Image (tube, grey):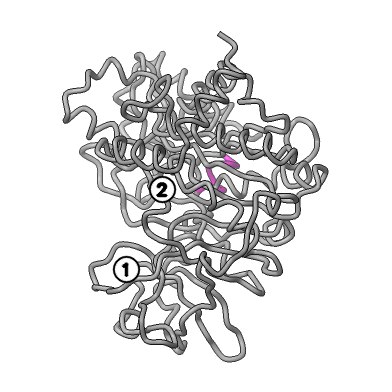
Amino acid sequence: MDQWTIESLGNITIHFDQLTDFQKQYLLQYMNSRFPPSRYTDNCRRRQQAIENMMKARAVLDGARQEFPPFVNWDRIEASQYDLQGCAVVFTAGGEGERLRLSLLSQGVPADSLNDFTKATYPLKDFFEDFGALHANLAAVSHLSSETGLDIPVIITTGPEGSITSRIIPRVLERYDNFGLKKLLVIEQDERLHLSADLKMAYQIVDGNPLPVMQPDETGGPLMKLKRRGSGGATPIEWMRQNGCKKIIIVQATALYDMRLLPLMAAASTGHDCLAVGILRSSFPKEDLFGAQTLIVKGERQYLAILEQDVRNERTHELKDRDGRYFLPLNTGFYAVDTELLAGNDLPDYATPPKELLPGLPRSPKIGYAATDLLPPAKDPIILTVNHDMYGVIKTASDLSALTELANRFGLQEICKKVARKYRTY
C-alpha cells in the first residue's frame, strides 16, 4: 500500500521527534495525500539522476570543438505583427521573487504589505493602476490581438497548487476579464521535495502545522507541464495545435520588452525548430554571470548549448564571430520553439548548486528542469540577437523604476491604459 506510517515517515524526516503527536499526524496526512512513498522515491531517483547529469554537463567540452552559433541580428529581419499567426505565447510567472522581496524590505517597505506578494504582479513604480510586469505583458498581447485580429493564444504558468502566484494571478485576470484575451490557459507548475544531501525531508512550521520544504520545478518545469494532460483531457500543446499554433514563444512574465520583439522572434524562427534570443558581447570576462550561447561540435554531432560560468574554458571566452567583432552572445531567457520539438523531447533532470534547505541545515542542490535544455535537441536552431536596451527584467527593487522607463519608451503604459479601461470589471 502506497502510504506512509508514523514510523516510515519518521525515518525520512529531519527532527521528526520534535513534533507533537498532533503535528506528526498532520504531516502524515499531508504527505500521504501529496507525496506518498512512491512519489518520494521518484523524487530521490530524479535527484540522483540530476546530479549525474550535472557532472556530465561539466564535462561537455571534453573532446568537443566550440564554434560561434548561427545568428541573425534583429535589424536584418523584416517582421510585422501578422508574423504572430500560428504562434502561442507562454508567460512563465511562477517565481515568488525572494530577492525582490528582500530588496523591498531593505528599502523600508512594510512586511505586512507583501503578504500577497508575487514578482510578476508587484506594481511597477508610478505605473498605471499599479500594474505589474504580468499586467503589462497581457495588455501588450491583447493589443496585438486586437490590431491584427489573430486572437493570439496565451498560457500563463504559475507556481504549484496553493502557492501565492497560483492564488493571486487568477484574481488579476478576473479583475480585467482576462485582458480581453479569448484563448487563455492558466497552468500550475509541479513541485518537488527539497531533500537534504542524505535524502531526508525537512519541514517548516506554518500556522502551527508542519509542511515539507518544497520547491517549484525550476525554470523548465513550466515547459514540461505543457506536455501533461489536464482535467479537460488535452495537453496544453494539443490545445495550442487545436488553435492553429505550431510555434511557442516563451517569455518571462517579469520582463518588459520592445513591442517589436515578439513579431521579430516569430519571423526569425521561420524555418527553424528553435530560436533563442541573445545579446552580442563586446567583451567577455571570466566572471561574467550570463550563459554563453555556443555551438558544440562532437564528432558528427553539433548542437546549440548554453554554457554557464562553471563549464566554460578559455576557448569559450576567446571565441568571436567571423568578422572578429563580437564574443559569444549572452542568453536572455526568451525562446521560440516548434510545438513538435517540445512534444517530442523531455528535458533532463537538472541540479542547481547547493541552496539553503532551512537555516541551520547543510545546503543541498535543488532539482528540476532547466529551460536552456530546450536547445540541444533542436535540429536547426538559430540565435536572434537584439540590443541590450530592447528588454528589461525585474530582479531587485531598483528594476521597478527601470522597467517603467522602458514601458514608457515602448508605449506600453498607454497600451495598458487602453486595454484596462476596456476590460476592467470592477
User: Which quadrant would the C terminus be assigned to in this image?
Assistant: top right
Badge 2, how many Cα within 10 Å: few under 14, some, many 20+? some
Horizontal side of 407 relative to 310 (left or right) equals right
Q: Are marks 1 and 2 in contact (CB under 8 Å)?
A: no
For the point 55% across and 28% down, the residue is 161
State the SS at label 2: loop
* Whole-number angstrom distance, CA of label 1 to CA of label 2: 28 Å
Label placed on residue 199? 2
* Image position of 363 with respect to 110: above or below: below
Q: Nearer the viewer, residue 391 or 156?
A: 391
- What is the x, y in percent for residue 319? 37, 84
Horizontal side of 177 relative to 252 (left or right) equals right
* Image position of 199 with respect to 145: above or below: below
- What is the x, y in percent for residue 335? 55, 57
Badge 1, how many Cα within 10 Å: few under 14, some, many 20+? some
- What is the x, y in percent for residue 246? 75, 54
* Image position of 234 with respect to 268: above or below: above
The residue pinned by badge 1 equals 309
Q: Nearer the viewer, residue 71 or 204?
A: 71
Q: Nearer the viewer, residue 229 or 98?
A: 98
Residue type, label 2: Leu
Horizontal side of 383 relative to 380 (left or right) equals left
State the SS at label 1: loop
Q: Earlier in the sequence, mark 1 or mark 2?
A: 2
Q: Quadrant of residue 386?
A: bottom left
For the point 67% across and 38% down, the residue is 147
Q: Which is in the foreground here, disc 1 or disc 2?
A: 1
Q: Which residues are magenta?
A: 37-43
Q: Quadrant of residue 146?
A: top right
Check residue 205 for magenta coloring.
no
* Image position of 173 with respect to 234: above or below: above
Check residue 41 for magenta coloring.
yes
